[in-house]
Amino acid sequence: MVGLLGSLVQLEKAGLLDCILYLSGVSGSTWCMASLYKEPDWSTKLETVKDKIIERISGPGVSWEDALAKLKKYYYGKDFFSLTDVWAVMTVTSRVKEIDEHTLTEQRNKNNKDPFPIYTVVDKQCKQCSDGGLHAGADLTNKRDQWFEINPYEAGYSLTGAFVDTSSFGSQFHKGSKKKHQDEFDMLYLQALCGSALGDGKQNKEEILKQMQEQPEREYEEVNKEMESDSFHCGFASDDVPISPPVDECYQVLMDLVDMNLTVLKGKDTSHLDESIRKNLNDLSGGTNHSICSMKKEVETTDRVEKPDIMSFTMDVCNNLKGRIKFWLFEAWIAMLECVTQWIWGRKYNFLHNMTDGAVPPALLESETRDYIDAGLSNNSPYFSVLRKERDIDLIISLDFSAGDPFMKLQERSRWSKYVSLSTTGEAHPSDAVSSELPSNATTASGQSNLDLSVRLPARLNHPMHGTVRFKPLLNGSEQEFVASRRNTVLQTLKKLQIQCSRDEVPNIALLGSGGGQRAMVGLLGSLVQLDKAGLLDCILYLSGVSGSTWCMASLYKEPDWSTKLETVKDKIIERISGPGVSWGDKLAKLKKYYNGKDFFSLTDIWAVMIVTSFVKEIDEHTLTEQRNKNNKDPFPIYTVVDKQSKESNDGDQWFEINPYEAGYSLTGAFVDTSSFSSQFHKGSKKKHQGEFDMLYLQALCGSALGDEQQIKEEILEKIQEQPQKEHEEVKKEMESVSVHGGFASDDVPISPPVDGCYQVLMDLVDMNLTVLKGEDTSHLDESIRRNLNDLSGGTNHSIGSTEKLETADIMNLTMDVCNNLRGRIKFWLFDAWIGMFECVTQWIWGRKYNFLHNMTDGAVPPALLESETRDYIDAGLSNNSPYFSVLRKERDIDLIISLDFSAGDPFMSA
């Protein structure tokens, strides 16, 4: 740790540090790396960072209390507890003198001025298997890859090329898709995972057992008291009635077991400990005999115990202790001793479990879990992480801080070094190549939850990270990968059509679907079916849509590889949109999710639930990012909207696109990961997470312009007005059951409000807004609203504007006045949501989201896009009813645009 720090300081003084592209570490060197990379751009202030590190590791360290609190988090926080958790808390903290709870993925884009960091471990099962590992020209059917690397973006097998997003390493996968989430490990755990080999197995066991043994007397007493207060079940009462266990005896057995394991490791006599353990167990169980193995060898010439005996004995005692005291630390110590006995380190779900990819060694696919350990147990320098062909390394500088030969660290030296040439001479890769230069056996993860083939590291590093903003003229990495693969498909399709061209001459063809509501939805579907019948569909590289065409796209892309079974998918869509539609009950349930689920509620939420569902006849709660790598045989989808503020002010870039990987401004080139679009950002980094919107909402965001503003208002208000009488009564009943506060009691005491009166005011307000839009008389509604408000407040006068003859501006003011009077009367979500809806109608708020460019200082971005904390997004058909700008980006290099027009009029003057 200290050696690497000093070496880096010297490189920096010599002006050489900025020549380094990668910094890869094993074991203790990773402790130094973890300390460095927690400081953004550490290489620009290395002297200061070095002083902070030295001061910290020279300090007092972590208290037992804090260590136990951290151990408790590890014990409860995941599916697998192992010696790595114990090592992190008991041993690593004693070296690094801190508990670092940051995660590796939090470093994304915070160290852009530093070398790219790679942490290395080895797969324990692969290391132990008799076939050793992988070497040049190895047969993958019977070889295993033990070399494993972890960086801020992905984790995986260096030579096999199988990777998963680092935030998902540890989660449970099945056939390449995430099945069960586990939280990302923190940096303290990572340092234990990488640096857990102080010596051989015996030395490590002694270290762990001594740490347990050295618990301070004060902490011992505190733990004992806490055990006594929390324990409630002995589990061995003869009449099956739980009784309080003698904590001292249980605790003594546990400590004696720790001492016995240490004593065996030292080769000393254990008879007094054996006697104490058996006596206490006997007392605990009221004289019941226990099936604990003998601690004497068959030939009883010594009282010393051999390794197999202590393992069996430890497991027997643990089984007898289990369940006696319901206290986490007691259970954790039992688990520790079991892990010591079974030697379980770094256990995690195997993200390759049950995959069927021939590029991955079968041995890596079978087990549900894998164990990861210090890479120094195989090779004490991390050559294999930088010898990946894709990294194209020209020079390796290896700093050796080993006690001995780094290639023969411990007795289990690496077998691989004799197979691998350390020469780094190789062909240079053209900068624009992506998948064509990959070895055929490369397997990587794209996104967080699905595994995919054929990725090259430079493309991976172009991916927008979930919590940062990307400014680059290049397409994002995932799109580059898709384009390279799709161009091969286009080439083969052209050949079938007797059109001969080389790979470089393959035309990039974009298909555009215009707006036009349900007409556009059905029209685009029919057009695609005809293209498929003509054998032309597989020539399309991009499919970009506006408004109603996006409804068709959403229905298509929910079916993986829809273009391979389009006739079947078409029939399903037609059957659905010809069906009965979504019930009012389901609509209200969905509206409730939208209302309670985010910081900004807008007309887009109402439009999604009330209008879009009436056309698409379903509530699609999948997200766009779930489509990643599920539509590799289809054109790349692009959904388009416009920035409302930019459209109205003509200042900034109004053209906005959304695809499964990123969302952003097409012409400016500012993008964010689609899963983070909606989240709050500050100066380019995520500040507050908001859940990703679903496909129903996306269809409303893209397709919300059926006509002019008056027509849209009428559509929304009429849908609310059409609420069935049965639903109306149900809503009122629910309001009455949950309402708790009238808000206008004269003596300031909350009273139960008259729900009928409140509800009637709200419905009258809907009717009044509709009546004004139609130019009809509103006096009877005005009278009803004022009378009910008067009754609700016991005769109090309200500041509600005059309504002698209501124009649009007047109804806006009156609506806001009535909403302000109604607010807070009934504590019921739908009542609040309807008030929120009226306010959104009055202020015309659509698609409001946090502005991910807020307060950034990048000169490439129009200043107008940086200032406001929020932006509103609306149907792109209001500016141009065909999504040309999404495919006219220079980086997409489109050769041919096929624009399908389903507009009622001129697509350039649709709205």
Image (cartoon, rainbow, N blue to C red):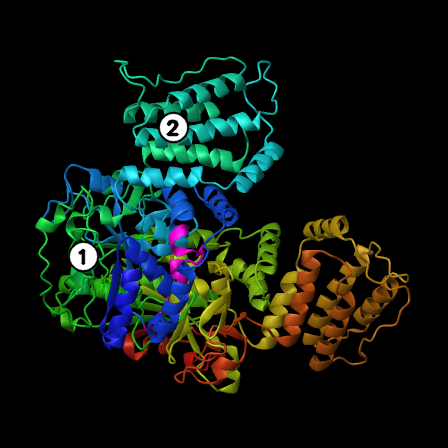
The residue under label 2 is: 260
Q: Position of residue 210 (x, y in %)?
A: 39, 39
- Residue at 15% from the left image edge and 73% from the top image edge: 505
At label 1, the amino acid type is: Tyr
Residue at 50% across, 37% down: 329
Q: Residues within 10 Å of mark 1 (few under 14, many from 20)?
A: some
Relative height, residue 665 to residue 31 (above, below):
below
Residue 212 point in image, percent of width and height: 43, 38
- On whether residue 864 falls in the magenta region, the answer is no
What is the magenta range?
A: 94-113
700 relative to 224, above or below:
below
Disc 1 on helix, strand or loop?
helix
Indicate the secondary structure of the residue bearing disc 2.
helix
Q: Does any portion of residue 884 appear in the rendered image?
A: yes
Q: Main secondary structure of the magenta part?
A: loop
> Mark 2: few, some, or many residues within 10 Å (few <14, many ≥20)?
many
Q: Quadrant of residue 243?
A: top right
> Residue 383, which numbered label?
1
Q: Looking at the image, how many numbered discs can be counted on the residues? A: 2
Amino acid type, callout 2: Met
Residue located at (71% from left, 59% from top): 831
Drawn side of residue 807 relative to residue 484, left or right: right
- Let me know if residue 563 appears in the view: no
- Which is nearer the eye, 780 or 831? 831
| Rendered-image quadrant of the N terminus | bottom left
Q: Is residue 102 magenta?
A: yes
